[in-house]
Amino acid sequence: GIETVEAHAERIDREGKRLKVILSGGEPIYGRTVIAALGRSGNHRTLDVPGEDLDKVFNRLYDPKDFRGQKTLVVGGGDSAMETAIALAKAGSEVTLTYRKKDFSRPKPENVDMILALSENPNAEASVEDPDSERVTTASGDFLAEDRGAGSLTLKMPTDVVEIRPESVILRDGEGNPETIPNDVVFTMIGREPPLDFFRRSGVRIQGEWGIKNYAAMASFILFCVWMYLWKSGGNPIHNFWVSHSWFPYNLSEVFSDLMENPKSLLGTIAISMTQPAFYYGLAYALIVSVFGWRRIARRRTPYVTKQTLALILIQVIPLFILPYILLPWMGHNGWLPRTFADIFFPVVDYDPHGREYWRAAGFILAWPLFIHNVFTNEPLWGWLVVCFLQTFVLIPAMIYFWGKGAYCGWICSCGALAETLGDTHRTKMPHGPKWNRLNMAGQVILFFGFFLLLLRILAWLGVPGLGGIFYHLNDKVYKFTVDIFLAGIIGVGLYFWFSGRVWCRFFCPLAALMHIYTRFSRFRILSEKKKCISCNVCTSVCHQGIDVMNFANKGVPMNDPECVRCSACVQSCPTGVLYFGQVDSNENEIRVDKTPASPVRMNEGG
Ligand code: SF4
Ligand code: SF4
Ligand code: SF4
């Protein structure tokens, strides 16, 4: 049965394996699990301006007719503010709507249309039968005017409220100019603060709130990534130091010397690979993607996630690990690879203990300019040049045309594999907003640098004097360390647990920047059933590419943001099943819906 206790819960403490709910003025309650069903909304947000405590300031509208003939100010740019302003204007109030931005982007488009229409003509048709806002408790429409006529609606955007006085308010426009307007009543419809204090008192870490421990943990992990990427890559002091001291794994040459004498045996081949850091990096990567991939499948439970994750695991394990580090070298040592094929794709070298560059096989999956090493070579490797050209300029554009950038970034690429598996529970850490969106352009700069290097490389191959040295310097000294090691490795992986797993993908990846051009011609969209959207913002918050998905969904506009990697988190997390993958024609009309279910709600609805 259910026992009810009426009391104020102050916080939750842990006591051994039990949780203790501390009640004010009562005995604590113990339990193994506590569900804090506090709702998502806490106290009303405040403007923090003088005069906010005056009796004329409200944050809820009960009966708009009470304010007929009065000068009212509505503060806010969301649906609550819009529905308040519409009801007041229709009831005969002289309404001023103030909002700190110059455009409305979040409210429902029909509310925006009504506000704009009323600002032009107070008698324009406008009605809200069933307000979305829990703070507007009455329907609105022409009936509110009761033959006395509507009031008026004036928009003041962008403006901030500076002060509220008994008979006026002071606003400040975007250039800092103050304006005093007569006023009888103010409605602050600017949302609520989440109820976080209870969790803070209970010692629950709140995402986005940083303390010294977070900074220390992030700095330590970044330092670890610095070491790892320098250890794994050649041509740097850490790597050279490791080799010169014969530290792990270079010391294994002695341990495995017997096995290594017979490279034709499978164990002999593996033993040779085990003397190289890249083997352990590839192994760890494949294991992490597999383990966290299974966890993602168990957590998300949609056919889309299952298929996508299995594809990512298989690609990571077979072509990106077993093939270059075990299968190809083993076949090569046994003479099972056709000689011409081996010479074209895996040139003979001295520095690699297998005698050939089998690591280049990663280029069958990773395309230029993400994986530059098969193109930026001393001599042209014609086989790889053909493969890279087909990947980058034929296959990927074709895939994007039908299925969007996510066909590669969400289903094939190894960086995507790690982000969708290890990064699955860190999606909400990606920062959103216009300031961060500006950094999205960094990838274009790196892409330009990549094309510039390609031009230099080709001209140097053609024998233009002096360019070989410049290319070598820019590629080996600048690009490799700043882009490959620092941005892709140290920053991309180092920020994983604090800023989500897609930092490199969203901001810096040059292949993504190239794909953004292809996506302009793509048919892929995330489509939405606008009428089901409750503007809860879940889809936006789970998007680890920083896309404001809700801004498309609540307007019913097909989502065509090129950053989308088709992870399906927004579709899967939407509580009302608004979103689904599909395709549109050139007029943005829906022409196809994806067959693989990605939304549990739509699956239950039979959609
Ligand atoms: S953005 Fe770049 S690194 Fe990330 S998944 Fe796509 S291609 Fe791979
Ligand atoms: S998660 Fe669904 S209901 Fe919530 S805002 Fe997004 S599309 Fe709308
Ligand atoms: S829009 Fe949705 S599918 Fe696309 S990246 Fe964001 S969460 Fe993933």
Image (tube, rainbow, N blue to C red):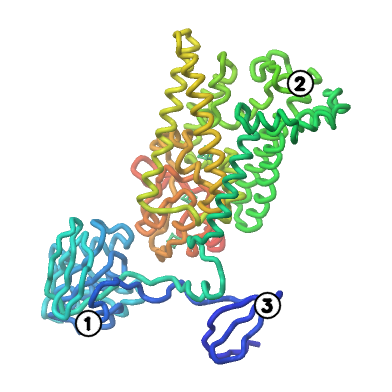
Image coordinates of residue 546 in percent, x first then y, are: 44, 51
Residue at 85% across, 32% down: 255
Real-space CA distance between mark 2 and mark 3, rounded to the nearest whole angstrom: 60 Å
- Of the numbered discs in the image, which one, if any, rests on residue 332? 2
Real-space CA distance between mark 1 and mark 3, rounded to the nearest whole angstrom: 48 Å
Residue type, numbered disc 2: Gly
Figure check: 65 above or below 339: below
**Mark 2 nearby-residue class (10 Å; few <14, some 14–19, many ≥20):** many
Label 1 sits on residue: 56
Image coordinates of residue 447 in percent, x first then y, are: 44, 31
Q: Is residue 130 left or right of residue 152?
A: right
Residue type, numbered disc 1: Lys
Among the two numbered marks 1 and 3 on one chain, the one whose residue lies closer to the N terminus: 3
Res 493 quadrant in image: top right
Q: Quadrant of ligand 2?
A: bottom left
Residue at 48% across, 26% down: 393
Which of discs 1 and 3 lies nearer the camera? The answer is: 3
- Of the numbered discs in the image, which one, if any, rests on residue 15? 3
Residue at 11% across, 76% down: 149
Tell which of 226 and 318 is nearer to you. 226
Task: Tell me the quadrant of the picture where the N terminus can be found.
Answer: bottom right
Tell which of 436 and 594 is nearer to you. 436
Image coordinates of residue 583 in percent, x first then y, are: 44, 44
Real-space CA distance between mark 1 and mark 2, rounded to the nearest whole angstrom: 84 Å
- Of the numbered discs in the image, which one, if any, rests on residue 494? none
Tell which of 137 and 422 is nearer to you. 422
**Residue 150 visible in this rendered orientation of the protein:** no
Which of discs 1 and 2 lies nearer the camera? The answer is: 1
**Mark 1 nearby-residue class (10 Å; few <14, some 14–19, many ≥20):** some
